[in-house]
Image (spheres, coloured by chain):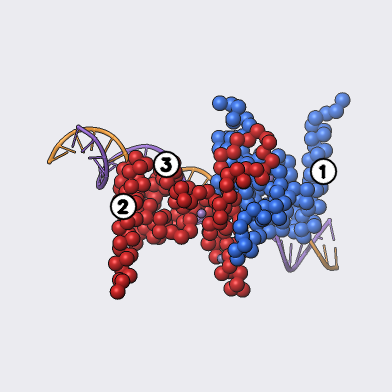
Chain colours: A blue, B red, C purple, D orange
Amino acid sequence: MLHFWYVHSMLDHIRDKNALITMQKAGISKTQQRIAVLNILSKAATPLNISSIRQSLQSKTRINRVTIYRILSLFKMRGIIRDITSSGISYYELATRENPVHPHFNCLNCGKLSCLEPLTFSQAKHLFNTDENFSIEHIEINISGLCSYCRNAT
Amino acid sequence: MLHFWYVHSMLDHIRDKNALITMQKAGISKTQQRIAVLNILSKAATPLNISSIRQSLQSKTRINRVTIYRILSLFKMRGIIRDITSSGISYYELATRENPVHPHFNCLNCGKLSCLEPLTFSQAKHLFNTDENFSIEHIEINISGLCSYCRNAT
DNA sequence: ACCAAAAATGCAACATAGTTGCAATTATTT
DNA sequence: AAATAATTGCAACTATGTTGCATTTTTGGT
Ligand SMILES: [Mn+2]
Ligand SMILES: [Mn+2]
Ligand SMILES: [Zn+2]
Ligand SMILES: [Zn+2]
């Protein structure tokens, strides 16, 4: 019989190792706090905001509020994560090769942020009449409405 | 000879009248503070954030910080204005028939927010593989990079 | 494994955005 | 013009985000 806790701790172990490799590659020190933040983001199914990250963290690692901001800022600079600001709130998600920039859907009822299928940069760029003199560096698309759960739970 | 100040005060007068008509139509009380906020937004060439609105206001009308939030919130509810949240900051612009929802460009250097040509809702909606069970209510597109001024001023 | 240097964290203090309850003021209605 | 209804100002509060500096942890060399 396969024990749930066993599989779980095994996955955690793999994640820890991946976290270390990521930081190795980025050339930054491997601290307890950074590993913890990275693990939470890699476990997450959707982008997380600061308060979600904080909640997930405080049950495991002792970590200061300021430290989380500094870690997220560093990770972003190094291209390890990217942030999405939807309706004024910053969310964070892993930025890997397999996970390119994509639009997001924000449920107006439950607040959940979901990832949508990616649009290629050129696809998106083609849409905007920027024959103008803007040099586009980033395109952020946030869609809002009701998620399937909230729509059916009237 | 045409006097600058004369044309200016004439335009101000027209704006005041328009503001009153707008609030009449919306069925809300016509207060000094609301007229002031509406005039600032109708004068603006680009969407304004709270601090810009506050700065423009304090030279003319005495108005409390909280009141501005309440007015903007009311105007938004009544469809008089719409807000754009680009990189975590809320901006406000007039929402008229002649000015439909459109993408915005945020200069990463000078921070200025510019309005881009509108995309029709169906055009935009067509882009996203939302054969999924989301009901789309709003599509927000924020593009960032360098504006012409900042790009040429290297 | 140990030590010094470098880097990261924790803490306190601060800044700004945004919200709420309630009393004072202003707008609307009669 | 007075009564009523609505709006505003004020104080207090929450949440997010930033900075300087002392303490702790990590790193790299021995
Ligand atoms: Mn995503
Ligand atoms: Mn605009
Ligand atoms: Zn929902
Ligand atoms: Zn610029």
- Picture quarter with the C terminus of chain A: top right
Query: Mark 3 belongs to which amino acid?
Result: Arg
Judge if badges 3 and 1 mark residues of a common chain.
no
* Near-viewer residue (A57 or B29): B29
**Mark 3 → mark 1, Cα distance in angstroms:** 52 Å
Which chain contains the residue that carries disc 2? B
Judge if badges 3 and 2 mark residues of a common chain.
yes
Residue contact between numbered discs 3 and 2, judged by CB atoms under 8 Å: no
Query: Can you tell which quarter of the image residue A105 is in?
Result: top right
Q: Residue at x 45, y 54 (%)?
A: B50
- Picture quarter with the N terminus of chain A: top right
Query: Mark 2 belongs to which amino acid?
Result: Lys
**Mark 3 → mark 2, Cα distance in angstroms:** 19 Å
**Neighbourhood count class around disc 3 (C-alpha, 10 Å): few under 14, some 14–19, many 20 upward:** some
Question: Residue tagged by mark 3?
Answer: B78
Mark 3 vs mark 2: which is more N-terminal?
2
Question: Residue tagged by mark 2?
Answer: B17
Q: Is residue A9 visible to us here?
A: yes
Tell me residue C9's x, y (percent).
Answer: 66, 53
**Mark 1 → mark 2, Cα distance in angstroms:** 67 Å
